[in-house]
Amino acid sequence: QVQLVESGGGLVQSGGSLRLSCAVSGIIFRFYTMGWYRQGSEKPRELVASISTSGSANYVDSAKGRFTISRDNDRKTVYLQMNNLKPEDTAVYYCNAQSPAGTDYWGQGTQVTVSS
């Protein structure tokens, strides 16, 4: 059974930081591209950051310079360090694992709320 369990969300003031974690089980983690998505109120889900099996990272423009995605293959965990948070970062953040064949697995989401 594949499980992705996010943690680390919460309420933070504008300019603050949070570190999201996603612990993965049930797949060969090192073979999967990992990503963090978010969905704000009445907005479509968007890709925030992704990291390949080789560790190459990509970010949405709004996250560049503020967010850092990383992975620990030994711990089967992916992280999203978020600095200088803004109210527009408020959303539910979802962890995603994508297989080489394109199969997607999702976590249950963790709420991030940034107050102004």
Image (cartoon, rainbow, N blue to C red):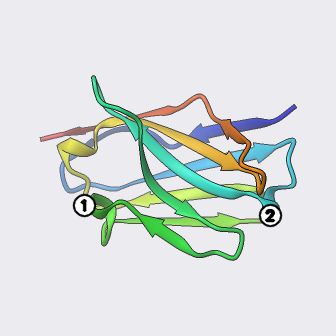
Instruction: Tell me where residue 81 sits by quadrant.
Output: bottom left
Q: Is residue 87 above or below residue 50?
A: above
For label 1, the SS is loop
Instruction: Find the distance from the CA under tag 2 to the CA under tag 1.
Output: 30 Å
Residue pushed farthest front? 101
Characterize the local packing of mark 2: few (<14), some (14-19) or many (20 or more) Cα atoms within 10 angstroms.
some
Numbered label tally: 2
Instruction: Tell me where residue 67 sits by quadrant.
Output: bottom left
For label 2, the SS is helix
Q: Which amino acid lies under the numbered mark 2 shown in the image of this protein?
A: Arg
Q: Which amino acid lies under the numbered mark 1 shown in the image of this protein?
A: Asn
Quickly name the residue at label 2.
30
Quick one: label 2 or label 1, which is nearer the N terminus? 2
For residue 112, say whether it is visible: no
Instruction: Tell me where residue 16 sits by quadrant.
Output: bottom left
Question: In the image, is 3 to the left or to the right of 71?
Answer: right
